[in-house]
Each structure stands twice: as structure tokens, then as C-alpha cells.
Image: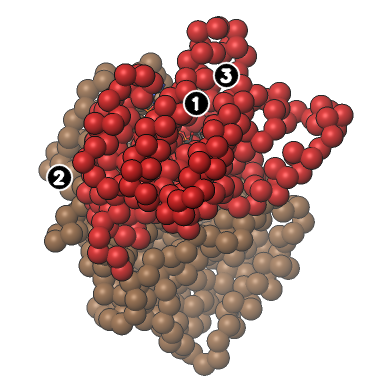
Amino acid sequence: MSDPTPYRAAVFGATSAIATETLRALVAERPAELLLVGRNPERLETLAADLRARGAECEVHATDLLNPDAPWASILSGGDWDLFLIAHGSLPDQQATLDDPHATGREIDVNLISPVRIAATCARILEKQQRGTLAVFGSVAGDRGRQSNYLYGATKAALETFLAGLRHRFAEHPEVKITLLKPGLTDTPMTADIEKGPLFSPASKVGADAWSAVRKGKSTAYLPGWWRYVMFVIRHLPDFVLHKTKL
Amino acid sequence: MHSWGRVAPVTTQVDTPAWADRIHPAPGPVLAYGLGRSYGDSCLLGEGRMIETRFLDRILDFDPASGLLRAEAGISLDAILRFCVPRGWFLPTTPGTRQVTLGGAIANDVHGKNHHRAGCFGNHTPRFELLRSDGSRQVVGEGDPRHAATIGGLGLTGIITWAELQLVPIRSAMLDVELVRFRGLDEFLELSRDSEEFWEHTVAWIDCAASGRDLGRGIFIRGNWSAHGELAPHKPPGASVPVDFPDFALNRFTIGAFNTLYYRRFFGRTNSLQQHYAPFFHPLDSIQGWSRIYGKRGFYQYQVVTPAEAGAEPMREMLRLISESGQGSFLAVLKTFGDKPSPGMLSFPSPGITLALDFANQGNATLALFDRLDEAARAGDARFYPAKDSRMSRADFERSYPRLDEFRSHVDPGMTSDFWKRMNR
Ligand SMILES: Cc1cc2nc3c(=O)[nH]c(=O)nc-3n(C[C@H](O)[C@H](O)[C@H](O)COP(=O)(O)OP(=O)(O)OC[C@H]3O[C@@H](n4cnc5c(N)ncnc54)[C@H](O)[C@@H]3O)c2cc1C
Ligand SMILES: NC(=O)c1ccc[n+]([C@@H]2O[C@H](COP(=O)([O-])OP(=O)(O)OC[C@H]3O[C@@H](n4cnc5c(N)ncnc54)[C@H](OP(=O)(O)O)[C@@H]3O)[C@@H](O)[C@H]2O)c1
């Protein structure tokens, strides 16, 4: 509790397990004022209670994150923000999604279009403030198209490219940070149906590492860090080797 | 899914709700599952639906003045400690592992090293909410028979969605600990009696490979909270046991050697030290997945409590049987329970001596030993612990728990477990 001025963060998809742990790590470290944004008001209130008990001040805002007409600018008005964190995402059964053109569109909306729209608004605010961090959850799945999750992977790869562009745009503003957070397999509700192996990390570890990457103003962070090496190998596997695997 | 003993895994449908609105207690049969730290089949349901609670881990309210915590039932004691220790609070009592959920700790009414002072876990849970299979939610508090039925109620009375827990204040995360070597059960009982007044936490490790003159030798461990030291919570675990050990890794020689080394780990009769709460209360938690040292066949726990009136005799007989069998264990623990009344209709602790051991699953030899232990236990009027059991008989269960009939009227018709089915067959 060294810093007395509260850290101000707005979090989209705040109810995500990894976002929850990221916020718990933040709140354990310093006073914070949080705006928790998501689609489900009761869940947001439950999360707010948890973070309040841990010492944070919280407001919640329930809204449809996918709505292009959502008044983000007014929701985020009136404040100086240290952090915008975009965490919502979804990983449904890939084949069923691809078999249904509407579902395919919805998935791209949740994982790419909506985060991009929100990020664009946040970028405008950061530009005005000339400081602050925009951190977005990508995924190791974006590093290489693989048969098991290429729809999800494609959205995360596109998000990565988008953020790289934003980072370029803010290159002249050293006080503005654009952070891409790339979790590996994490034990959360998103992966509840996937059998847990040794590559899985607890959400508490991934969240703590996410907060640490944000605090340090990293550009890209694999969570936990060893995923960088795993993905280095996977990215460099020749197709004829990759195609023999079930990855 | 499997329980901590890994003896009889089940394949079943599992729900993992992350939010209270996602817990669907119907259609049944269902059973709540915490972190699976029970050893036998009381946390398993082979044919039905298991509702895993570990994502329901939020703190709902905390009063820093009184230390009353209200949290979702899937929060682990590990997470509660990481939250409360820096704030100067601790669990009212803790089992030998932090990796259990709040709901699981209530449903087995777990006990810890301070039982003689604090009683059971359920003595400190003034209120909780029960979700029944008919969809109703009921907040039950002390004095309500449904409260008493749910504490130690083995998950059969409804799903606990949240619970209040009264924490206790600490000034430091450290304990002042004294280790005292004893040569037999009589000395153990004497040490227990003498320690009760001035020591908040007591337990003994027993060398169950020792025989003859050494039978019942061990180390008495007692501790009090320190007045000095930081309020530093435990660290996340480091090493893990990633694979099952081969079956030959544990045998009577490695166990015997380990026990002798452990018994001889300090010179003189007593040894004083200051210890963090983590190694003091949860020595095994620093090695994730340690139960895998028992290999693929898993292991059994065995725990009974013998009544205070019976003295040391029944325990002595059981220790003799174990040492004779050569199937000792690393973790043989002896403790006296105090006479604070247990809150639950099926709470395990009752005044007397409790012995807890684990045995690698060596098939028939292990089961034969258990049969002999059961006989000795019955002769000593002992009570068995469902959280540690995969094989107690219906008659033993009924004899162990005189309030069973009263309990039955509170069982939710949509809930059952493999243990409960076994007890009603
Ligand atoms: C190393 C080790 C040391 C231990 N030491 C001790 C000790 O010192 N003292 C002691 O008493 N025990 C001890 N135990 C046993 C352990 O504390 C209990 O088995 C505990 O209940 C396990 O909690 P869990 O969350 O893993 O629950 P599980 O084992 O998953 O479930 C236990 C029971 O709780 C029920 N349950 C779980 N969640 C809910 C809920 N939300 N609502 C209703 N019912 C629910 C389940 O249906 C089941 O009947 C130890 C276990 C281990 C592995
Ligand atoms: N878990 C992993 O293994 C893993 C690996 C790599 C990357 N990630 C990424 O990390 C981020 C967090 O994941 P997590 O594992 O913490 O997931 P999670 O716990 O399942 O949370 C998912 C979040 O997304 C929200 N959401 C889903 N669909 C939505 C929709 N249509 N509209 C609005 N909100 C929606 C959920 O809101 P509700 O609470 O209202 O449902 C929730 O806040 C995601 O971006 C994910 O892609 C996860």
C-alpha cells in the first residue's frame, strides 16, 4: 500500500475468471477504483463484493458488450484512467459453430469485433490523456492456426495485429502502453470441459502474471512466461510435422 | 473424477458452475464436490451428476472489526488464508491441508490441532445458505435443525451456496512450537493432558513401524501463536509430484527407515522452534499431488476415535496390529479430542483419542489388516470417519452415529453419494 492515489481501471468482461484474478492481484497490491463492465448485473455485483472485501472501490455497469451503439464514451467519461482491460471471450465447440453461419458470426463478434470497438474508444481516451494502459486478452491460440481451435485462434490473431497497430500509433507517446496478454491453457470455466493436463495453469497464477505484465508496461506477455518457448516451438514446426499432430 | 485416495475413480457427469445462478440441483441425483480431498467415496457419485464448486470462490462480505467472513462455498481454505492472514485473521480451525473448500469443510465438519479448544469447523459457521433439489434456497443458522444436519452432513442435505465463517485474530503468521519425544501411549496421554491448558494446538506423530518396547513411540507437537513475526501468508506450492510412483517405491523398508529417521530428527527429549503456519498445519501442501507417491493403485486412510473412558488400551491394540502387519505409513497421527460438543448430527469428533493413518493399497493384505483393525476398534467402541473411509460397514456406520435417524429426515431426496448408497444397501 505504498501508493496512496487509487489506481483507476475499467474492465470489460470483468466476470471472466482470469480478469477476476488479475484484479485480485492488483487490489492486493494497491488501492484501486474499479469500473466493472459486463453483461450480467448479478454476477458483476458478486464480483464487486469480492473486490470490495479486498479493499477496492467498485462500480458496476451492466450492458451488452456486443452492441455497436453502446455509449462507451459516456460510460467512460469523467475520469483519468490508469487501465482499460478487455477480457471477454468465448470458446465454444468449433465444429458446431462453423456449421452455423450465425453462430460463426457471433463468435467473431465476441472475440474480435466487440473488443476492437471497445479498444478503439479506449484508444481515443488514452490519446486525450496522453497516458494510461490498454491491456487486452489475446491467446497463445493466435500464434498458429491449428485444427483444434482455428476459428478462435484466427480472432485472437487478428486482435494481436490490431493491437500491434495501435502500439505503433502510440509509439510517440511513451506514457501510453498497449499490452497484449496471452494466456496459455488456463483452468477456468472457459476450459471446464477440456481434460486437464500438466500444461494447465491455475487462473490465480495467470491473473497474477497478467497484473505484473500490466504494471511493468509490457507490450506482449505470455502467461505464464514459459508459454513463449512452447509457442516458439509450435510456430516453427514445419507443416508436415504439425499436420501429424492433434494439436 | 476421483477422491484423494485414488482407489476407485468414477466416470460421471460433472457440472462446474462458476456462478450461483448456474447451480442446477435438479434433475437428480446430484452431489456437491469440493476439491475432492476426502479419501473415500463420500464425495463421489458414479451414477448421477456431480456439481463441482471450486469456481464459486468469491468473498461476499468481510467485517474487519469482528472477523466475520461470508463467502461462496467453493472458496478454498488456501484462498481464505491468503486473504485473511495479511489482515491479522486466521481460520478458527484447520484440517491438515488448505486445499479444501469451505463447503467441504462444513460437510465433513472437519477438525484440527486445536480441537480441544475450538471444537470443530462447524462450531464457527453461524449461518449458511442451502440450495435444495426442489430449487428452494434456505438460509439456516445456529439452532436450526437443518444447520445441525448439514454440518457433517456429507453433502446430502442440499448444496451449500455460501457460508459465514468466524475467523480468529492473530498477531503473527508464526507459531512457537515445541516437539517432545514420547516412548509410548501412556506418555502421549500424559503429554496431552498437560498440554491442554497452555497449548492451543496439539498433535502427535506416531512411529507405527515400531514394535515391542518401542510400540507407540512418537513425537508430540504443540504450538501457540507467536506474538512476534510478520503477517505473511503462505507461498504458492513449488514442487509437484507429476507422475504416479511405481508400486515398489513404498515398502516396509522405506517406511520403516523414514519413520526411524523422523523419530530421531532431533537430539534430547524436546526441541523448540518458531514455525510458519504453513509447515505447522499443512506440511504436505508444499508438494502438489503428493498422494501420487502411492502409485496408481492409490491408498487408503483409516481414522477412528476411541472414547476417552476407554483410555489407551484400544489404541495400543490397534498399533500392535499395524506394526505386526508391517504395513506402516508415513502419516500416522494421534490426537486427543476435547469435550466441546460437536455441532453436527453426524460430526465425527467426540471426546477421546483419534488415530489417522494412511496405507498404500496393497490389495488383500491391506484389506485384511483393516478387518483386524475394525474388530479392535469395535471392541473399543470406536467411531469411524466417513471422510476417510471407503469400506466401513453399514452396521459400523449406524453404531458410530447415534443421531443417524434424526439426520435421515433432513436428507434431500435429490441428493446421494456412493458412500450413502453403500450405507443404505
Ligand atoms: C492431506 C490431508 C489432510 C487432512 N487432514 C484432515 C484433518 O486434519 N481433519 C479433518 O477433519 N479432515 C482432514 N482431511 C479431510 C478433508 O479435510 C475433508 O475430507 C474435507 O471435507 C475435504 O473438503 P473438499 O472441499 O475437498 O470436499 P470433497 O472431498 O470434495 O467433499 C467432501 C464432502 O463435502 C460435500 N460438499 C462439498 N462441497 C459442498 C457444498 N458446497 N455443499 C454441500 N456439500 C458439499 C461433498 O458432497 C462431500 O460429501 C484431510 C485430507 C487430506 C487430503
Ligand atoms: N482459459 C483459457 O485457457 C484461456 C487461454 C487463452 C486466452 N484466454 C482468454 O482470456 C480471456 C478470459 O478468459 P477466461 O478463461 O477467464 O474466461 P471465462 O472465465 O469463461 O470468462 C469469459 C468472459 O467472457 C464473457 N462473455 C462471454 N461471452 C460473452 C458475450 N457474448 N457477451 C458478453 N460477454 C461475454 C463472460 O461473461 P459472463 O460472465 O456474463 O458469462 C466472461 O466475463 C478471454 O479473452 C479468453 O479468450 C483464455
| Image: A145 above or below B310 | above
Who is closer to the viewer here, B345 or B140? B140
Q: Is residue B96 visible?
A: yes
Q: Residue at x 51, y 13 (%)?
A: A105
Which residue lies at the image location 62% right of the left edge and 69% below the top edge? Answer: B209
Q: Name the residue that disc number 2 marks.
A: B142
**Mark 3 secondary-structure assignment:** loop
Q: Amino acid at mark 3?
A: Asp
Indicate the colour of chain B: brown
For the residues beneath circles 1 and 3, the answer to whether they share a chain is yes
Which quadrant would residue A39 be assigned to in this image? top left
| Circles 1 and 3: CB atoms closer than 8 Å | no
**Observer-nearest of A180 and B50:** A180
Q: Colour of chain A?
A: red
Question: Where does residue A59 sit, x and y in percent of width and height?
Answer: 22, 40
What residue is pinned by disc 3? Answer: A93
Q: CA distance from mark 2 to mark 1?
A: 47 Å
Camera-nearest residue between B311 and A197: A197
The residue to which callout 1 is attached is A111
> Label 2 sits on what residue type?
Glu
Is label 1 in a helix, a strand or a loop? helix
Q: Position of residue B263 (x, y in %)?
A: 57, 79
